Amino acid sequence: MVSSPSCTTLLTPAQMQAADRAAINAGVSGLALMEAAGAAVANAVAAHYRRCPIVVLCGPGNNGGDGFVAARHLRDAGWPLRLAYWGDPTTITGDAAYFAERWTGQIEAATPATLAGAELVIDALLGAGLSRGLEGSLAALVQALADSKLPICAVDVPTGLDGASGQPMGVVAPAELTVTFFRKKPGHLLMPGRQLCGKVVLADIGIPATVLDTMDAQVSENHPALWLDRYPWPTLDAHKYQRGHAVVVGGSIMAGASRLAAMACARIGAGLVTLAAPQDVWPIYAGALTSIMVQPMADPDGLADILSDARKNAIVVGPGAGLGQTTRRHVEQALATQRAVVLDADAISVFAAEPQALFRLIDGPCVLTPHDGEFGRLFSVQGSKLQRASQAARLSGAVIVLKGADTVVAAPDGRCVINTNAPPDLATGGTGDVLAGLIAGLMAQGLSPYDAGCTAVWIHGEAARLFGPGLVSEDLPPAIPRVLRRLRRRAEARSA
Ligand SMILES: NC(=O)C1=CN([C@@H]2O[C@H](COP(=O)(O)OP(=O)(O)OC[C@H]3O[C@@H](n4cnc5c(N)ncnc54)[C@H](O)[C@@H]3O)[C@@H](O)[C@H]2O)[C@@H](O)CC1
Ligand SMILES: [K+]
């Protein structure tokens, strides 16, 4: 239950360790944290599995310590359980040693043979302390665990998964269930980490939320709690000019793309929507649209003419645009207005040869919506998806919506969200055009680029999730109202 924005905060393993230390400085003992963590693992296992023979694999650090605690709880509850340790049990230190010394059962050596007879495995080998790829006997053990296809409950993260990036560092045995503590990590949400973790159970282990006040935790899981109180619901005295005027620049090749973007602008609530159509294909657009105005654009400054009306306060360039000089000119004319601009697809790729030329033009509210391929053409940055999107936002001065099953929305000031509600059904042509339109439609109504990005990405995923399989892009704009009705009810409940 997300009761406040801070519940959606994500912490990297390093930040988690700082939270751990802050809690201990605030008087919570490390032993109490480990006892609570292990108990949470035992509770999650009891809630998700029927009693069966378990093997608990414990590693050399506190992740292993959690495993000793969980093993004690489950064995006391009558589960047939064996505990196996990877490494030399006499070298256990810190909080883990306290619980290892009090373990009254056998401590076997963890080898692939240990798995024989198990029907469920608790992976307490490595957690947030993973600092390098798995090697030697540990890699062999994890490989055997992966090959065994046994159901696994991972403690904190599956062994070998980098909690900061969601990237495996060597072999990872995919878990059915992952129990983590206090706050999720980016690696629980970023691909392939989200798949490798299975169902993530977040346990409160007694770390006070106030520890977040002392941290600059700027990454969150996308959720309405972050932006719903700023959603631009129409007020009773609303009139169409108050709700902004979005302009979608039509392409002369794929006419459908800009129509999808225009419909999305309208459905998300922009007061007016104009589709600026190239002169030669204007009749095609005009014939296909009703409430959306279609204005012919005479090259080369047709768009500048259309934008001379200052009430046109949000512009989308990219859907169906093509990679020619016309598209580049349209981007320049749109950005020159310093009004809200969304650049998608070819409007991004057309600057692949000289990204700086684009970045120099970005001076107003701007959102770029690349997928990985378009992103790679414009930015040569390294690191996790989070790090790459954040660096690109700082470099370009725009909000970056780096799309995928784990879309990241990053602002130049460092704020970031990872979106997790997008179903695989969205992997069909044209859904990016709809997203670009949703973002522009929200900025037309006054939302900031970052809020518009987070809100649009969530609504886009929710509309697809509610629609279900068989989705094609033209199903998305008509599916928006249902999502808005649910959001409005949630907003009214909060303000009641
Ligand atoms: N931070 C917190 O708030 C809490 C953390 N707890 C547990 O503590 C864990 C972190 O404990 P640690 O920091 O001791 O680290 P881990 O227990 O994750 O790792 C243990 C040690 O393994 C070694 N290691 C790292 N990479 C390795 C590799 N590739 N091959 C072999 N050995 C490797 C490192 O020396 C590391 O210290 C968390 O994952 C969580 O399970 C819990 O006890 C509850 C509280
Ligand atoms: K683990």
Image (cartoon, grey):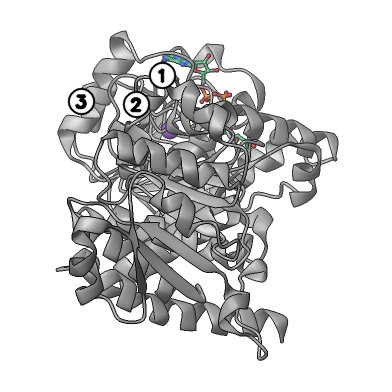
Q: What residue type is labelled 1?
A: Ser
**Percent from the top left, x then y, of residue 129?**
53, 22
Element on which disc 1 rests: loop
**Residue where numbered disc 1 is placed:** 380
Q: Where is residue 153 in the image (x, y as percent from the top left)?
A: 36, 44
- Helix or strand or loop: what does disc 3 sit on? helix
Expressed as whole percent of the image width and height from the top left, the position of residue 6 reads: 68, 54
**Which residue is pictured at 38% across the width and 34% down the height?**
158
Q: Amino acid under label 2? A: Gly
Q: In which quarter of the image is residue 190?
A: top left
Query: Is the Cβ of the residue at disc 3 closer than 8 Å to that at disc 1?
Result: no
The mark closer to the camera, 3 or 1, is 1
Please report the residue visible at 36 percent of the width from the left and 81 percent of the height from the top: 291
Question: Nearer the N terminus, badge 3 or badge 1?
Answer: 3
Give the residue pinned by disc 2.
Answer: 376
**SS class, disc 2:** helix
Labels 1 & 2 near each other (Cβ < 8 A): yes
Q: Is residue 137 above or below residue 4?
A: above
| Dot label at residue 144 | 3
Q: At label 3, which amino acid type do we have?
A: Ala
